Image (cartoon, grey):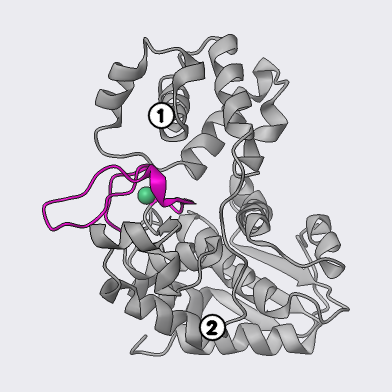
Amino acid sequence: MKYWWLEKYQNMEVRLLPQLFSEIEYFLTMPKNYIKIYNQLREIPIEELNEEELCIILYRIAITKNVSDETLRKVIDRLLKIPDASLPISDYTFNEIIEEIKNLKLKKPIVEKLETNNVAACYNCLNIFYVDKIKKANKKGLCLCPFCEKDKLYFDNDLVPMNYSFLYLSKIYYGISSLGCDFSKIKKLIKKGLLIKENSDEQKDVCDLNFLEKYKMEKIRCEDEQNIIKDLDDEIRSGESLGLYEKTIVIDWNTNKNILELSNLLIISSIQSLSNSFYLKKINLIINNKEIRNCVNNILHILTKRNV
Ligand SMILES: [Zn+2]
């Protein structure tokens, strides 16, 4: 399910709306001219709109807080029926991931490629979708994303990983993320603010990470990544309203499952938390699993190298 985060609002109560609105703003990226498109769509019945148009309606509702429950329910019901098109997570090391991200700008989404590809991914709005959705190109002959109208696309035959965490890192790398600082500042932030420890006596403000338990048994799939990053970020920043300067997280991992995947997600959510927080300046990651600890330290080492 692509829009898994809407599931909890299916039979929604009004008091949940502020949370819904903030999640819509978190998960959806709009094209510049979305208000104009919205104005053209407003008279069309919800049943006739496509996925991209439904997202615009939903975003506009969240921004203006102007909504009838009936419209909102219909939009949510339709989006929940859209399947996830992402490809499985690659087993690349972080070094290989960074190499692929650096090469992304060489893989231009030229219109000619549409004939030989099935799936496209956008590292501006982080959508993964079938190429038959692509209807527009720019003057340079590059395909434009149907969701955000940017040319930050690549295709399945480019043989580049096509999963959420890869797209998220690419977005940060190319300085188009909404994190409020560029990649070099993010590297500094992580170097200063993320501390990896084996164990610690003082375990104040420890997060409850129950949502990770099931991944000790089953593989982290592409559709889980978005979910895990959001939940980890929410946990890490749960002290923001109290003005907490420091947060400690304990990763208690007694299995060899999902080592690479979890390490990447821990780094990404730490990046997200540190760069989005006003008060939080330090995250202590206590990891009792040697392999994850090595993997996270290795990623940190690569990320903070000068020439990355
Ligand atoms: Zn896009």
The residue nearer to you, when weighing 163 against 133, is: 133
- Residue lying at 74% horizontally and 75% vertically, measured from the top left: 258
> Mark 2 Cα within 10 Å, few/some/many (few <14, many 20+)?
many
- Left or right position of 168 against 84: left
Q: Amino acid at mark 1?
A: Glu
Picture quadrant where residue 270 is located: bottom right
Q: Are marks 1 and 2 in contact (CB under 8 Å)?
A: no
The answer, for residue 281, to whether it is visible in the render is no
Q: Estimate the x, y position of residue 217 in percent, counting from the top left.
A: 87, 67
Front position among marks 1 and 2: 1
Magenta stretch, residue numbers: 125-152
* Real-space Cα separation, disc 1 to disc 2, in angstroms: 35 Å
Look at the image and tell me in which quarter the C terminus lies.
bottom left
Looking at marks 1 and 2 on the same chain, the residue that comes earlier in the sequence is marked by 1
Q: Which mark is residue 94?
A: 2
Q: Estimate the x, y position of residue 154 in percent, counting from the top left.
A: 37, 64
**Which residue carries the number 1 mark?**
53
Residue furthest out toward the left: 139
In this rendering, is residue 125 above or below 187?
above
Residue behind label 2 places its C-beta within 8 angstroms of ligand 1: no
